[in-house]
Image (spheres, rainbow, N blue to C red):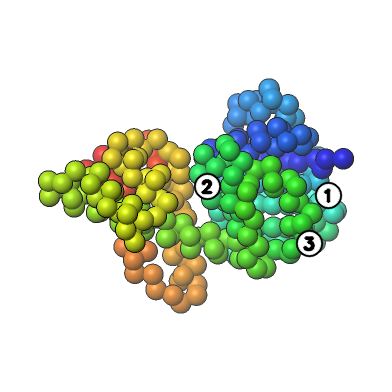
Amino acid sequence: MQPKVGLIGLGLMGSPMGRNLLKAGFPLTVWNRTRAKSEKLAAEGAAIAASPRDVAAASDVLITIVSDPPALEEILWGKEGALSALKKGSVYIDSSTVTPGLARRIAAACAERGADFLDAPVTGGTWGAEKGELVFMMGGEKEVLDRVEPVLQAVGKRFFLLGPNGAGQTVKLAMNMILALEVEALAEGLELVTRSGVPAERLIEVLQSSMGRAPVLDVKAPVIIKRDFTPSFPLRLMHKDMRLALELAKENGVELPAGAAAFAAYSAVKAAAQGDVDYAAIANYWRKN
């Protein structure tokens, strides 16, 4: 019998994850702050819960993917919080990007209730979520991952167990800091060549044939050149992740000079942005629009 799955958070990543869980045949119960997003999945077979608590009560495997630590804390410990209704023997998987400290706090709360926990942030963008090809960075026990891997295979393709609870979040914050730096460096290089009279495409052509080659070029270079910043990974979320990475660095006494400089640049672009844009809009640094 398929385990009953609960999903809280139906944004850019959560909605396609829910759709893939339904396609794989898992009984799915969902909740989202904006009910309209739940109703779209209900039309495809999901049940809508009245609260996070009700999702947890109905689920053998609970998955959350929300925007930031305060949102997650409210879902777990709020008036209708999910933690109070976790079933003994169930598994809770958090795919939000939050702090390692919060992940460890959640793990302790789950243990008190006889449930297991994996911190499991993802990468792959909306296209990866839609294709069911997300990559998971995970903290927790292998036995727990083995139990829920059939569920995760409906939404992902690679599952990296990186250490105890908190390890998944640590690696995710470091990885997103690197991605932010890569895209800022790309934007700076493109600005330099175009201001010097060379078409942007010529720089990309050379990069693709050099040690500067990176998969991020395939995804973000066309976005920057076309100046279409429809969000795949929103700037507001990358900005949050960079802030969390810098806070983690401070906790550990590590200076991140390039990260700090990039955060200042992304902060300026975020302050000037009109509406929700992709983090590739760092290319607007020189335009302030």
Q: Residue at x 68, y 22 (%)?
A: 43
Q: Residues within 10 Å of mark 3 (few under 14, many from 20)?
A: few
Q: Residues within 10 Å of mark 1 (few under 14, many from 20)?
A: many
The location of residue 36, given as percent across then percent down, is: 60, 26
The location of residue 265, given as percent across then percent down, is: 30, 55
Q: CA distance from mark 3 to mark 1?
A: 18 Å
The location of residue 208, given as percent across then percent down, is: 33, 52
The location of residue 173, given as percent across then percent down, is: 50, 60
Q: Which residue has dot 3 on it?
A: 143
For the C terminus, the quadrant is: top left
- Per the rendering, the mark at residue 87 is 1
Q: CA distance from mark 1 to mark 2?
A: 30 Å
Q: Which residue has dot 2 on it?
A: 124
Q: Amino acid at mark 1?
A: Lys
Q: Amino acid at mark 2?
A: Gly
Tell me if I can see residue 272 in this picture.
no
Q: Secondary structure at mark 2?
A: loop
